[in-house]
Image: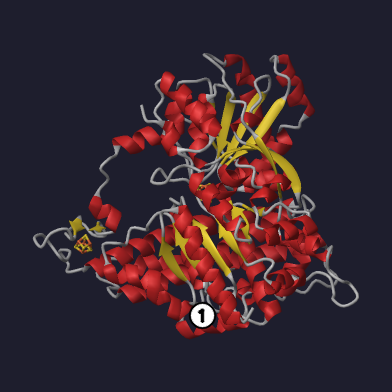
Amino acid sequence: MINCELFTCDAATKKLYEKAKKERIDTVWDRALAMQPQCGFGEMGLCCTNCSMGPCRIVKVSDDGPKAGICGATEDTIASRNFARAVAAGSAAHSDHGRDIALALYHATGKIRVKDEEKLFKIAGEWGIAVEGKDASRIAREVAEKALSEFGKIFGKLLFLKRAPHKRQNLWDELGVAPEAIDREIVEVLHSTHMGSDADYRNIIRQAIRAALSDGWGGSMIGTELSDVLFGTPVPRKVEANLGVLKKECVNIVVHGHEPTLSEAIVMAARDPELLELAKKQGAEGINVVGMCCTGNEIAMRHGIPMAGDFFQQELAIVTGAVEAMIVDVQCIMPSLATVAKCYHTKLITTSPKAKVPGAIHMEFDEQKGLDIAKRIVKEAVMNFKNRKGEVYIPDVKSEGEIGYSLEAIIKILDRVTNSFAHPSGTVKPLVDAIKSGVLRGAVAIVGCNNHKQPHNSCHVTLAKELLRRDILVVTTGCGAHSCIKAGLMSKEARKYCGKGLATVCELLDIPPVLHMGSCVDISRILVLLSEVANYMGVDISDLPVAAAAPEWMSEKAQSIGLYAVASGIYVVLGVSPAVTGSENVTNYLTKDLESVLGGRFEIEKDPVKAAEKIAVHIENKRKRLGI
Ligand code: NFS
Ligand code: SF4
């Protein structure tokens, strides 16, 4: 058995890992151990399977062995192609999510009232859709259509690029990286990295940048914005977090995955009086819906639904023995869930035609019949309550935090301190003032997943604390947000970790020092916030005293996010290295040369304390250059 003290800092995780071991359940950590040693070729990005003459691998550790693939592809070509394909897959995942939200909006028009009409009108305005004489439903349909056309339009650039500072837009144009249509950028990566196409690593990365930008400023932004229109823009609220939010006496439903279309319907269905009645008949006190991973973030932000756990806690949720159903859609769903669920009474229910898991029950979700299907799914869970077997153990570990900091919410908070005589409300001025005065040194986004190559949660949390004490504000999304709320960093008490300046800012604005901005697609909110700040200051994003970090990342989506952040001018510190280190050229290009081209670059730093030091140096340098 592995000593869990070493691999996680989270108390609930430790307790449930012990239960898992007692019950002979294999978890992600056990499989990671069994996988050692991991393949060095793969780890360095030096294995190519792009054609059936391969697999080919480049030997770096000794002078013997092949230095090129059978077709002659070099380590630079192979490593950059692998990286670009990962970025394209990540961009595809985010963007296809965005498309599904746009489709949901399209089909919802005329049937339901959108929740945020103000945002709908704003987007219509930005996109040149005339609103006079039209009702919200018609505008919603036109906005949805226009969003859908972003994926395959024939000419022109992505509409949301206009949100970036002018300097950034011009730079993208000059470099030829301004994306045109989302699907096309992803297809072009696949084409140009096909055997015998692009062999120039710089050019391969250039195309990867286009695909990544079409994620951040395209698919993800569409996903976020249209989710807000449909389901409401998040506002600050309190939620509980960690596996202790499961309730022994209730029917527990864990919603896990990414697309709010499913989770919103499940949340509604679980409030159905008939189903509540049925739950009582089964001997339960009620129905307890909780969220996991990014879906957890989405429904916490919009409904205050408890955040049950992050990526590495998904198996452990089932190990409690208290989960009647785990309902999943797409992305970050471990196939192992089916195996774990078999050992308990838990029903694993897949809902997307894009993500079926052998051993799970498939109940396909269809937005147009959303609530009906959701009710059927919830009923499955309710009827499963009586089938609990073995020991039910819910660790008494949970914390509370304030979440829901959409850009709109942040601006509203800033308005509280804006002097309305001298300055109009609705701007980021107070934030800029705090940065300029030096009370706040800068801001950092801590995002991303969990990865067994890093101690679970502790890298996110250590990094956040190290930044807070240096008066650097932290914003977070995804599983990083789960880590931070579990560690209590989203509560007012977390001010004790802050330097004097940041503590004062938090007190004045009445906010926690770590702001939860949503799911991973919601990193687009951070891009818009940075653009607003840069525009207000009359500079580019790359001039701002900011940075991003993904200390425990693992997914292809995270690689796309990292690259679009770099291409937006941001310094991005990764705790786990992408699989490119076999090529010195590609590694140098991503971690050094890109800075002179785009103003942003990657940094690989495993140690969160050192990462914080590097970020602080970066931020102080940016301040110096701005003369503040
Ligand atoms: Ni982001 Fe969400 Fe978590 Fe990583 Fe997965 S849930 S989209 S990819 S693991 S943060
Ligand atoms: Fe090998 Fe070239 Fe085929 Fe890759 S594309 S598998 S390097 S022959």
Q: Residue furthest left?
A: 64
Image quadrant holding the N terminus, namely: top left
Residue 316 visible? The answer is yes
Identify the residue at horizontal 55%, vertical 31% (top origin). Answer: 12
State the colouring used for the structure image. secondary structure
Left or right of 26 on screen, residue 252: right
Helix or strand or loop: what does disc 1 sit on?
Answer: helix
Classify 492 as above or below 166.
Answer: above
Residue 100 picture location, percent across and down: 59, 54
- Nearer-the-camera pick, 93 or 530: 530
Identify the residue at horizontal 32%, vertical 65% (top origin). Answer: 81
Residue 99 picture location, percent across and down: 58, 58
Classify 584 as above or below 326.
Answer: below
Q: Amino acid at mark 1?
A: Trp
Residue 230 picture location, percent across and down: 72, 54
Identify the residue at horizontal 39%, vertical 73% (top origin). Answer: 592
Left or right of 220 on screen, residue 143: right
Left or right of 3 on screen, residue 158: right
Q: Which residue is mark 1?
A: 172
- Nearer-the-camera pick, 70 or 19: 19
- Nearer-the-camera pick, 526 or 575: 575
Identify the residue at horizontal 24%, vertical 70% (top origin). Answer: 196
Classify 173 as above or below 512.
Answer: below
- Nearer-the-camera pick, 489 or 377: 489
Q: Residue furthest right?
A: 421
Residue 210 picture location, percent across and down: 46, 72
